[in-house]
Image (spheres, helix red, strand yellow):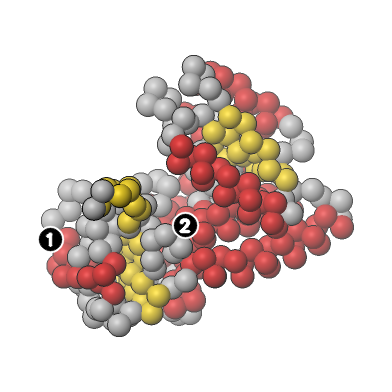
Amino acid sequence: MAEIIDGQRIAGEFCDHIRDKVQEIKKAGIEPCIALVNASQDPSSEIYVSRKMKMAKYVGITSLVHRFNSDATGNDVADLIGKLNDDDRIHAILLQSPLPQNFVFRELVNLIRPDKDVDGLTTLNQGRLFSGEPGIIPCTPMGVMHLLNIVHPQLAGMHAVVLGRSSIVGRPLAQLLLNADCTVTMLHSRSKNMAEICRSADVLVSAIGRPRFVLKNFIRPGATVIDVGVNKIEENGARKIVGDVDFDGVFGIAGAITPVPKGVGPMTVAYLMHNTLKLAYCY
């Protein structure tokens, strides 16, 4: 039976540490501030923004939220990003995703100054990660690594399989695992023999965005399973959120597993605070 990796508790402890650090730099006259830009009309996006605001308040970071109406254009968002780039009070800028379909996320996120790119998604910061140079690293992959390091203080030599190749999670996470001296296999929607390959993993991370896609036959007994997926489904007449992993089926086989919710999600928010602190203090 698997150990449940309590991301909510771990994130809370990490944020207590961040709060102490925020108080230290405030004594030096630095007031960390993050700008959250939300152009989406999706209710879920507003929920995520509210959670980030709540955590920012808890750790002592100022959060400024900029919301757009449904008639906003990409140029409107671009103009705002330009103003935030030039505002010395702002240390960090987050462009909340997903964006409306007529917006191009990559074009807009690349307008953020790299030294204010709190989620490490600009081409420059991603290039720094893949080149092994210092920079800001995406929050979710950092949160995943934090959880893995608690279960496995020494990851070197382990075989890690990553399901998903997005620039937000899969690709940067694979690089972080390589940096930790893991042997890394990346799988995606066109990969073959996925279950067989996954069964060879000491560590399996799923960020593929398919509800309950990872079944018990994907799991080597004792493997660590990190579920990044957040999928909305209807079940028995009710809406609920489930991960990429069939938790009930995998629980009896894995050695350790994250739940959804209260697994990776809280760690993403915690590392958003961590990166804001880093941008305020180091850049």
Q: Is residue 53 left or right of residue 261?
A: right
Residue 258 spot, x, y in % from top left? 39, 68
Instruction: Name the residue rendered at 52%, 60% in the picture.
Output: 267
Instruction: Name the residue rendered at 57%, 49% in the picture.
Output: 51
Residue 207 in view (yes/no): no
Residue 190 spot, x, y in % from top left? 17, 48
**Quarter location, residue 259:** bottom left
Residue behind mark 1 = 193
Residue 57 in view (yes/no): yes
Instruction: Name the residue rendered at 16%, 64% in the picture.
Output: 195
* Quadrant in which the N terminus appears: bottom left
Residue 103 spot, x, y in % from top left? 43, 25
Crowd band around label 1 with a 10 angstrom C-alpha radius: few (<14), some (14–19), many (20+):
few
- Tag 2: amino acid: Gly
Residue behind mark 2 = 265
Per the model, the C-alpha gap separating discs 2 and 1 is: 29 Å
For label 2, the SS is: helix
Q: Looking at the image, is mark 2 or mark 1 earlier in the sequence?
A: 1
Instruction: Name the residue rendered at 32%, 56% in the picture.
Output: 242
For label 1, the SS is: loop
Question: In this picture, is 11 found above or below 155?
Answer: above
Q: Which is closer to the viewer, label 2 or label 1? A: 2
Residue 55 spot, x, y in % from top left? 63, 54
